């Protein structure tokens, strides 16, 4: 399998490509990773490769590839949840399962892309499990999820799970600067450092200041923790009241800052791009407190993904972060 326009995660691409080329692609694949890492893009490319009739898949030249790219292929189906917990309803999966037993129209496979599968209700996942246990030989399910932890173990055990990661900074910077006018290599590199190699978020930051604003919020949170200012911490976290997705971003970003503070020295790589903040934390907090803060970020992220009440979530963020630093 050859893929152009998708960089990074070469090992995963190679493994999945070998399975396609050998005709041994699994009936179910879960692609997990943060927003902006290319889960949906990869799912669509895999679907295109599965229906392709060219020698090198996807050839992007045959009629099957053209239909897939134009999103009119009769054997590729895409469903996605709004993003909240349990927003992927069982009725959708029941319709999918019913349709899956109908033979493909044109291709060798029928491919179902289920976006935000981590938002499936338990009943929806159980309905999907029934066909995963004994799927028709021509059916392939490609699920995307922010975290596989939100999926039932029984679903995961019948799927191949791959985890996307951020791209290498130099490679990503070359890719971005070559495709976006007025974005220099250095600007692209700084954005990727800020967003831990996440191309989607780095690109969005050039057209939407939201991510840069949240990076500033994270710096304010770190300063409030060091200064032991409960009021400043609460003010910084108030931005999360209207946007739960920003909590997920902040947890990932803060964890990178705390990690940088833990290993910070003159030669260390700065994943967060916030070296000054990391140095400040390193001089003010013990190693154990930094480790505790990283663990708190993981816990808070899981709460955000579970659609917890926003007001309660903000209170929990403030309390947990202060507790981790002994305030």
Image (cartoon, grey):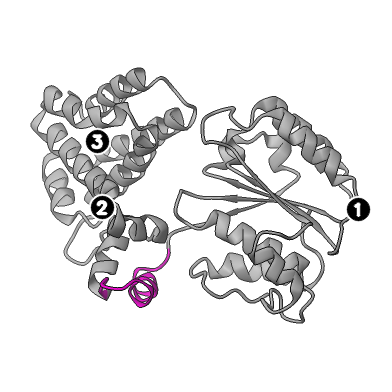
Measuring from the top left, give residue 290's x and y in whole percent.
Answer: 26, 40
Task: Please tell me which residue is depicted at 72% across the width and 34% down the height of the picture.
Answer: 92
Mark 1 vs mark 3: give the one in front. 1
From what the image shows, is residue 152 above or below residue 310? below
Measuring from the top left, give residue 280's x and y in whole percent.
Answer: 12, 46
Disc 1 or 3, which lies upstream in sequence? 1
Disc 2 or 3, which lies upstream in sequence? 2
Disc 1 or 2, which lies upstream in sequence? 1
- Position of the C terminus, as image quadrant, is top left
Query: Mark 2 packing: few (<14 Cα in 10 Å), some, or many (20+)?
Result: many
- Quadrant for residue 326, please give it: top left
Distance between the alpha carbons at the discs numbered 2 and 3: 13 Å
From what the image shows, is residue 100 above or below residue 166? above
Residues at discs 1 and 3 in contact (Cβ within 8 Å): no
Distance between the alpha carbons at the discs numbered 1 and 2: 53 Å
Which residues are the magenta region?
167-184
- Quadrant for residue 48, please give it: bottom right
Viewer-side residue, 268 vs 303: 303
Viewer-side residue, 287 vs 93: 93
Q: In the image, is residue 318 part of the stretch drawn in magenta?
A: no
Report the disc number at residue 289: 3
Give left or right: position of 200 versus 272.
Answer: right
Measuring from the top left, give residue 197's x and y in whole percent.
Answer: 37, 61
Viewer-side residue, 226 vs 7: 7
Dot 3: element: helix
Measuring from the top left, give residue 32's x and y in whole percent.
Answer: 56, 49
Viewer-side residue, 151 vs 74: 74
For mark 2, what is the residue?
A: 260
Task: Please tell me which residue is depicted at 62% across the width and 40% down the height of the picture.
Answer: 117
Dot 2: element: helix
Dot 1: element: loop
For mark 1, what is the residue?
A: 103
């Amino acid at each position: 399998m050859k893929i152009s326009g998708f960089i990074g995660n070469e090992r995963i691409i190679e493994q999945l490509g070998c399975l396609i080329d050998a005709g041994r692609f699994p009936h179910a694949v879960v692609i997990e990773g943060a927003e902006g890492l290319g889960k949906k893009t990869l799912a669509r490319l895999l679907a295109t490769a599965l229906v392709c009739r060219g020698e090198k898949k996807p050839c992007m030249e045959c009629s099957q590839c053209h239909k897939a790219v134009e999103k009119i292929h009769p054997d590729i189906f895409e469903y996605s949840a709004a993003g909240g917990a349990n927003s992927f309803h069982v009725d959708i999966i029941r319709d999918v399962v019913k349709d899956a037993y109908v033979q493909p129209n044109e291709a060798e496979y029928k491919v179902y892309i289920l976006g935000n599968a981590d938002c499936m209700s338990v009943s929806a996942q159980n309905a999907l499990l029934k066909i995963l246990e004994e799927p028709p030989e021509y059916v392939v399910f490609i699920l995307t999820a922010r975290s596989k932890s939100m999926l039932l173990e029984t679903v995961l055990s019948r799927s191949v799970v791959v985890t996307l990661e951020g791209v290498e900074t130099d490679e990503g910077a070359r890719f971005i600067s070559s495709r976006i006018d007025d974005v220099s290599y250095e600007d692209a590199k700084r954005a990727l450092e800020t967003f831990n190699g996440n191309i989607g978020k780095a690109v969005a930051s050039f057209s939407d200041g939201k991510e840069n604003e949240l990076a500033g919020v994270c710096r304010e949170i770190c300063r409030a923790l060091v200064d032991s200012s409960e009021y400043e911490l609460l003010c910084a976290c108030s931005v999360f009241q209207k946007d739960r997705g920003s909590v997920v971003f902040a947890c990932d970003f803060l964890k990178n800052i705390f990690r940088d503070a833990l290993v910070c020295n003159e030669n260390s790589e700065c994943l967060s791009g916030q070296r000054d903040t990391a140095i400040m934390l390193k001089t003010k907090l013990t190693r154990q407190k930094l480790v505790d803060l990283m663990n708190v970020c993981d816990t808070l992220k899981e709460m955000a993904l579970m659609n917890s009440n926003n007001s309660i979530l903000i209170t929990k963020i403030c309390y947990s972060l202060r507790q981790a630093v002994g305030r």
